[in-house]
Structures are given as structure tokens and as C-alpha cells.
Image (spheres, grey):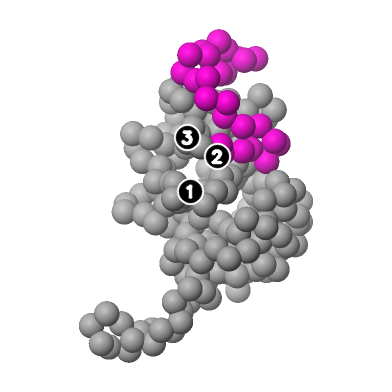
Amino acid sequence: MARKIRIPLPLVALLSLAFASCNCGPGGDGDSGTQSDDGGAKPPPSDTVTCGTLTATAEQGTWSFYPVGDTYGTNTFAVWRIEEDPAHPGSYIFSGDGASVTDVLPVKDWHVPTPVWGAIRLALDGKDPYHFTADDPFYLWYIPYVSGTSWQSLLGSKNDGTCPASVTPLSGPLMCIGRNQLDPYAGRLTSGRTYLVRLSMFIPLGADDHNRVQSCYQMILRL
């Protein structure tokens, strides 16, 4: 079983009250029935979410990602630095605290490791979860465009809707890739290091012991 990691996620605490009654997606608490649609017994709800697979492509000077297959959708992106576990070759740990990297997350009370960079969108407008695809992937360091409530990076940046008109390079990378807008405070990946990239449908409810995970898609990126 994966070890719990208790590290705060500053942005999501600001938006917690809007989700006090949120009940959506697979693996949640909303369906307590015991009978399936065909009259048979329902399996008990799972207390974990197994992460699906991400596809990665290097294009336009950055990496892009989207889940493989017919997915539930996501509202959160994050990238962490990881390293091989010296005690278990072939396995990985999060750099810094040494917690194990797994492909299974708890449905409730996920203690979020501190990412290198991430972005999230929280709104009750029916536009979450968002389905990233090969034609509309998530670009690393770029904040996706969605009308209404903006995605927001964990560094506080938002997509102001001026892309793709604003295409001037910003310290090297393009300001825009389509309607996706570069977070000017984002860092860079370092050659020779290994990273965990994860798209998920994540509902933060104020504190680590109230977090909810509805979906997860991830990959390990070795540079």
C-alpha cells in the first residue's frame, strides 16, 4: 500500500468551500445503492483509483500529454521530480521525502506531494472534467483555455483569453500554443532527471484528509 504523504497544496485551499457538496465521477461517495441497472447485485465501491496511461509528445518546444482511451476526464495536471528507489531497483520515490510512487491513489484523503508545477480548474459549470485528446492535449507549463472559470497554475497564473493573438516568445518559449497560455512563472525540466506526470480529476475539500480523487492518468518521463 502506498505511503500517505501530507504536504499542503496552497491553491486548492482557497477554493475548497465551493466543493463541500460535490459528488461526481467514478469512485465517489454518491452512489450507495446495492442493485445494478439489470437487477443484479452491485460490487462494493472501491476505495482506490488505479491510474490509467498517458501519451506524451514533444512538440513546439514543449511536452504535451493526453490520456489513452475513452477516459473519464480530468481537472488537474501536475508534474513531480522522482528518482529510483535505492532499496527497490525499478521502483521510484518522490524526490525530497522519499515516498513511494505508485499507480494507485486513494479515493478519499489523498495527501498530495508538492509538485514541480501544476494547474487546476474548479468550477460547478459542467465543463469539468475536461477530456484532453491527441488534437487537444495538455501542454506542460501552459494553462489551458476554457470559457468561464479559468484554469489556474499552482503559482497563481491564469489564462487571460488573449491567446492565440499573443504569440511573442517569453524568455524563449512561445506565449501561446493555440489558446493555451504560458505560465510566466513556470520552471523547466532538467535533462538527466526523471519526472512523474499526472492528469487527474481531483476534488480538494480544504484539507488533505478531505481530498477526493475521481480519475487518474500518469506516466514516468525520463529525460
Q: Name which residue lies at 63% across and 38% down.
A: 153
Magenta stretch: give its range: 149-176
Question: Cα distance, mark 2 to mark 3?
Answer: 6 Å
Residue 197 percent location from the top left of the image = 54, 46
Give left or right: position of 28 versus 15.
left
SS at circle 1: loop
Give left or right: position of 207 versus 136.
right
Residue receiving disc 3 = 147
Residue 77 percent location from the top left of the image = 55, 45
The numbered disc on residue 149 is 2
Q: Amino acid at mark 1?
A: Asp
Magenta-span inclusion, residue 151 = yes
Residue 99 percent location from the top left of the image = 70, 61
Looking at the rendered image, the quarter that the N terminus falls into is bottom right
Q: Nearer the viewer, residue 180 or 57?
A: 180
Answer with mark 3 or mark 1, whichever residue precedes in sequence: 1
Q: Furthest residue to the left?
A: 38
Question: Cα distance, mark 3 to mark 1?
Answer: 10 Å
